[in-house]
Every structure is written in C-alpha cells, then in structure tokens.
Image: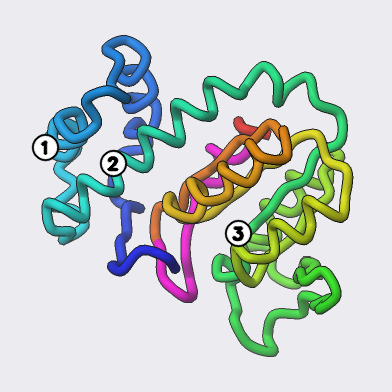
Amino acid sequence: MPYPFNFDLTKVSRSLFKEIARIAHSSGIHRRMGEAARLLLKKFRVQEFTGLDFSEGVQLMEDFIEIQIKNITNRERFINAKRKALLLPHCSRKYMDSNCKARFDPTIPSYYCSHCSNDCLIHQATLLGERRGYDVYVLPGGSCIKRILEKERYEAVVGVACGMEIRLAERLLEKLGLAGQAVPLIKNGCANTRFNIDALQKIL
C-alpha cells in the first residue's frame, strides 16, 4: 500500500473513469493535471464521499488521469499482443487467512486462486483472465512483478493495483518494451481492497 493514506471510492460514480479519459483527450489535461483534478474532485464530490482531504484527492485524481492516458496510448499495441499476463493484488481476496484456499508458490512468488468463493473478487477476475487465455498471478506485492516479467516472455500485461504502484510498474514495462493496461483500486488498504470488475472485463 504505497499511498500514505487510505481511500474508498466505491461510492463514487462509475462514470468517473470515463469522464477522466474524455476530458483528458479533449483538453490536453495531462498538461494541467492539478487544475483538472480539482474540477473532477468538485464535480464528483470525492471529498464528501470519501473523507479524503484536498491534497490526497488531487493526488488520486492525477494518478487516475495518468493511468487512463497510458491505457489509451498503449491500447492498440496491447490488443495486437499475443501472450499476456494478468497481475492481481492478493489484498483483494475475500479472505486473508486460512479460509482462502489459494495455493502460494514462493518461487515466483504468487498465489494461485483455487476458486473457493464465488463472491471473491480474485476468483471472478481470475476466471475472466483464464477464459481469455491470460496467465494469472495473484501477487503479494509489487516487487514480484519484475521477477515474473523477466522470467516469462510476455508481450503485454494487465495490472490491478493502487495508482501509485501502477505508475511504478509502468516504468518497468517501458524498460522491457511491454504494452500495459491498468485497472486502479477504488478502495485501498492492506485487506478487503476493491476494484471494478466491469472495468477489468472491458480492459481484458
């Protein structure tokens, strides 16, 4: 959890991300991120819904804007890629104890979903990825990404994580020449984190 604060955007309208992408492309928002983030914060009442203070909200909006811009920029190359990996955060599992039946392989390191709970986000995301031919990893931390990508010969990657970790991973993808797509968490923390499964399905 790289952010020094917690957030929960699960009550914010799902149209937020589409609106971010639309405004970003129509007005060159990446050059005026601070100003644009303030407008989005006000429009979507982020502070009211989440309790985040202004600077934290601006940081989130800036990261989300950057993620959407990168997704759009890399989309064509991603679609044309053959071998793909889906990287999921272990903190989105329904259970963070022995109730979770995921198998952990320390040599990678990664959890592998055992599909023990139908209402578990990781179960749902793993099924989506596997049905589309992705190799799916449930990672205990962002530091595992480099080992996986240097060991395997993927052409593209989809990652689900908090905005700050996504931006850090983007640097690695650029270095390795891989096309990336990202889905940011809408609720962070060390457990019970959340992401939009519909957004992931569209990205895949």
Q: In whole angstroms, how far apart are the C-alphas of marks 3 and 1? A: 30 Å
Can you say whether 102 is above or below 10 in the image? Answer: below
Q: Secondary structure at mark 2?
A: helix
> What's the residue at 62%, 32% (across, down)?
203
Q: Is 162 or 8 nearer to us in this picture?
A: 162
What quarter of the picture does the C terminus occupy?
top right
Three-letter amino acid code at the position of disc 1? Lys
Horizontal and vertical percent position of residue 99: 68, 85
Is most of the magenta stretch helix, strand or loop? loop
**CA neighbours of label 1 inside 10 A, class few (<14), some (14 to 19), many (20+):** few
| Residue 18 picture location, percent across and down | 39, 26
Q: Residue at x 39, y 59 (%)?
A: 187
Asked if residue 72 lies left or right of residue 104, the reply is left
User: Residue 145 at x, y = what percent?
Assistant: 69, 58
Which image quadrant: the N terminus? bottom left
Which structural element holds mark 1?
helix
| Residue under label 2 | 61
Q: Position of residue 135 (x, y in %)?
A: 83, 49
- Position of 188 with respect to 149 (left or right) is left
Instruction: Classify 10 Å Cα crowding around label 2: few (below 14), some (14-19), many (20 and above).
Output: many
Q: Which residue is pictured at 86% across the width and 39% down the height?
A: 133
The one nearer the camera, 180 or 6, is: 180
**Tag count:** 3
Amino acid at the residue labelled 2: Met
- The stretch in magenta equals 188-201
Q: CA distance from mark 2 to mark 1?
A: 11 Å
Q: Which of the labelled discs sits on residue 121, or is there none?
A: 3
Furthest toward the top, the residue is: 26
